[in-house]
Amino acid sequence: MSFARALAAAAALALLAGCGTSDAGSGATTTPPPATTSPAPTPEPTTPAATALPGPEPFVADYLPDLPASLYVPEGVTAAPLVVMIPGGSWYTADPASLDALARYLAENGIAAMPAKIRAGANGVLHPVPVQDILCATAYGFAAAEEQGLDVGPVVLLGHSSGAHQSALATLTPEAWADATGTCPWDPATPEALIGVAGPYDISLIPEVAALLLGTRPQDDPAGWEAANPLRLAGARPEVPVLLVHGTFDRVVPEFFSEDFAAALEAGGHPVTVEVIEGGDHSDVLTPAVSGEIITAWVKSL
């Protein structure tokens, strides 16, 4: 890695660490609680209620206990793609509120969209629990959209920041993260396409922050870190198309993370589209005004 990239990765590490563990407005850093991998209680697999949605307002329900998802259903269509949307938070938090505006935009343009909360470091979990949550949310989203009368397809995973990293894992190697505990009550729905927005895919460049997800250092578990690095999995499922979106003014996750991932995916045989947003930063790439049209056009092209 060049000296310039090393500096950029170091800066990203510091910013990601601040994004994930700082108290809002105070600058104080909190200490993550001890991590556990205890599964959530198994819910009864109830079918989502088939109620009409007023306009683009979402149908909200927990796909697992205390893990809500907000399904936005497009009006006037009987068939639509489904985009399951996963938030970032430096692997420490995962609040989907930042995805609602983009989800509403997608629904207004004929695409079912569902932001979902997943567990993260602040909930005392480690990898692969968040990836298992993503796959469970995807399964729920498919079932809920069908219950709302949609012929669903394709199923697309969209992740932002650390959510993009974890969505890449869930899409490239879904079978590797199967939930052996049977916690998820929904029939599996395999992601068929991936949208990564401002993602830090190569976790080997930011090990101090990614340790929040893995609970180890790279030297202590090299195989585990390799298996959780999307760049090392880029040859898996080469039929899966990928859209990567990144802003040129992203000071949290530098643009080269997407460039490197795109190169690895292309070498692995994936159809890859890279959209670089001139002047876009880490947050505004999620806004409908900046990326809504790009994401809508790409999903509809599938």
Image: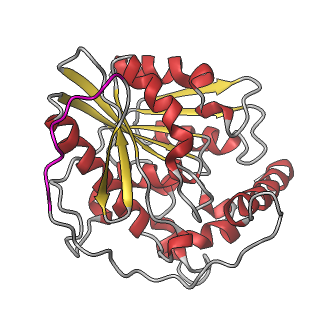
Q: Tell me if residue 46 is in the magenta stretch.
A: yes
Q: Is residue 272 above or below residue 292?
A: below
Indicate the quadrant where residue 57 lies: top left
The x, y position of residue 220, in whole percent, is 58, 84
Front residue of 86/237: it is 86
Give the residues drawn in magenta, as a range. Answer: 45-55
Left or right of 203 in this view: 123: left
Q: Residue at x 33, y 18 (%)?
A: 110
Indicate the quadrant where residue 10 lies: bottom right
Q: Quadrant of the N terminus?
A: bottom right
Q: Residue at x 70, y 39 (%)?
A: 255
Q: Quadrant of the C terminus?
A: top left
Q: Is residue 228 above or below residue 140?
A: below
Q: Tell me if residue 7 is in the magenta stretch.
A: no
Q: Residue at x 69, y 32 (%)?
A: 247
Q: Residue at x 55, y 79 (%)?
A: 215
The x, y position of residue 169, in whole percent, is 42, 55
Instruction: Look at the magenta stretch and give its main secondary structure.
Output: loop
Q: Is residue 258 above or below residue 292?
A: below
Left or right of 227 in this view: 239: left
Left or right of 121 in this view: 104: left
What coloring was used for the rendering? Answer: secondary structure
The x, y position of residue 133, in whole percent, is 36, 60
The x, y position of residue 271, in whole percent, is 41, 30
Left or right of 206 in this view: 188: left
Indicate the quadrant where residue 19 lies: bottom right
